[in-house]
Amino acid sequence: MFDTLSGRLQGVLGGLRGRGRLSEEDLTKALREIRLALLEADVNFKVVKDFIAAVKERALGTDVLKSLTPGEQVVKIVHEELTGVLGGGSSALAFAGRPPTVVLLCGLQGSGKTTAAAKLALHLRKDGRSPAVAACDLARPAAIDQLEQLGRQIQIPVYSERGSSDAPRVAAQAIEQARSQGRDVLIVDTAGRLHVDDELMDELVDVRKAVKPHNVLLVIDAMTGQDAVNVATTFQERIEFDGVIITKLDGDARGGAALSVKTVTGAPIKFGSDGEKLDALEVFHPERMASRILGMGDVLTLIEKAEDAVEVDEQEEMEKRLRAGQLTFDDFLKSYRMMRKMGPLKNVVNMIPGLGKQLQGLDVDERELGRMEAIILSMTSDERQRPQVINGARRGRIARGSGTSVQQVNQLLNARKQMQKMMKQMNSGKTPNLQSLVAQQRRGG
């Protein structure tokens, strides 16, 4: 979502990096470009104005321009201020001392609220919680069916009462049902409308009074830009929500909603969704998102995704083999399947420091990875373990079996050699390894 903004900001700040001298005129010119980039990204005007003023004051007020690395200092200030705009530190849900904890979701129709309820339930279960969901969207005929279908997919109970029009009563009964079944979290999905109206707000207020939620989360669609911020402001006046779930972060919107909502409403973004799959919900980390936007990568999130995608014993076995400079096609296949679990390849690439910028504009074709898997599966077990035995005749057989060409088989064989060579270099200390990248990220480097 932030691709265009990220490219613009990296271009401006890249021109400042490494310069031995930086004048006030240079800084003013750079800030003018940053201001235009933010406005074009549909960021709220007041947010942009305050952001630029804060960066300029810090850059001019701390002898930054006279330092040995003025460009790097300005980049650091922009990163810190951008983190502040996105919300500062991560914001967790509040959990009740006496279960169940009630999480009330609200938002407009089409914002992804019902799907967000299922995603949040799955996320909480992975965290060791025992969640349930209450279907209190009684205005949309298919809402209960949709939520029950999602509940079956992730094996989480959905409490519903078909034929009822009393959402507050259904929500209150769902709490009692969750308590009797030992569920420690209840997520309440409420009705949305195509626009903000008094009837919607009155029903939400009544549901809130009935369930006394510990968390009220507004679900907004990142694709709606400034309209999402206007909607958030209206909801905050009536409902006083505690945080935001922002959906469709993987879309091609300009990013204005995510960069404006915290400053405008005072409520932090607690979760972000960057895909359609039910496991595509993450805790929102402002500092990590700021790093991604500025092309600094996001190693910590990358590590977390990798840990979720592969078992610990598999990690240890693969690491042992890679340290020994061994890379079989079985390893290749495991790596590929692990990356598929981590999400869209483009998102994963952008988390690796420096790599996202190098590949900017490159169209990542996920189908190529599918062809790679087909080629590997067409090999025998011995060929996958000992690629050096693959001669001309075997390459022809593998190409026919996978529906590819000999040239594509050769490309994969060469790619394996190059990756094995790179792993040997990393283990010899010639290039930074993953552990050093993690340590650097945690130091804020």
Image (cartoon, rainbow, N blue to C red):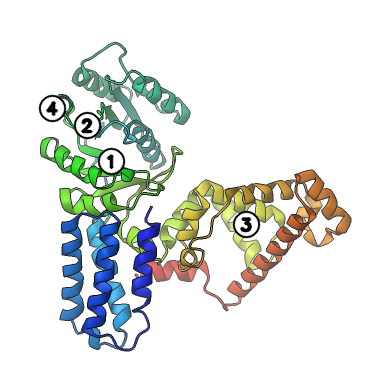
Of residues 212 and 139, the one nearer the viewer is 139
Q: CA distance from mark 4 to mark 1?
A: 19 Å
- Judging by the rendered image, the residue that carries numbered circle 4 is 198
User: Helix or strand or loop: what does disc 2 sit on?
Assistant: loop
Identify residue type, mark 4.
Answer: Asp
Front of the two marks 3 and 4: 4
User: Helix or strand or loop: what does disc 3 sit on?
Assistant: helix
Quarter where residue 230 is shown: top left
Front of the two marks 1 and 2: 2
Task: Name the N-terminal-most of marks 1 and 2.
Answer: 2
Identify residue type, mark 3.
Answer: Glu
Task: Examine the rendered structure and indicate whether residue 406 appears above or below residue 248.
Answer: below
Q: CA distance from mark 3 to mark 1?
A: 42 Å
Residue 226 at what x, y percent from top left? 24, 47
Task: Examine the rendered structure and indicate whether residue 256 appears above or below residue 297.
Answer: above
Residue at position x 21%, y 38% in the image = 215
Residue 150 at what x, y percent from top left? 42, 28
Front of the two marks 4 and 2: 2
Of residues 316 and 429, the one nearer the viewer is 429
Task: Name the N-terminal-most of marks 3 and 4.
Answer: 4
- The crowding category of the residue bearing disc 2, from other C-alpha atoms within 10 Å (few below 14, some 14 to 19, many at least 20), is few
- The crowding category of the residue bearing disc 3, from other C-alpha atoms within 10 Å (few below 14, some 14 to 19, many at least 20), is few
Position of residue 201 in the picture relative to residue 431 (left or right): left
Do we see residue 96 in this rendering?
Answer: no
- Judging by the rendered image, the residue that carries numbered circle 1 is 220
Residue at position x 32%, y 51% in the image = 284
**Disc on res. 317:** 3
- Judging by the rendered image, the residue that carries numbered circle 2 is 195
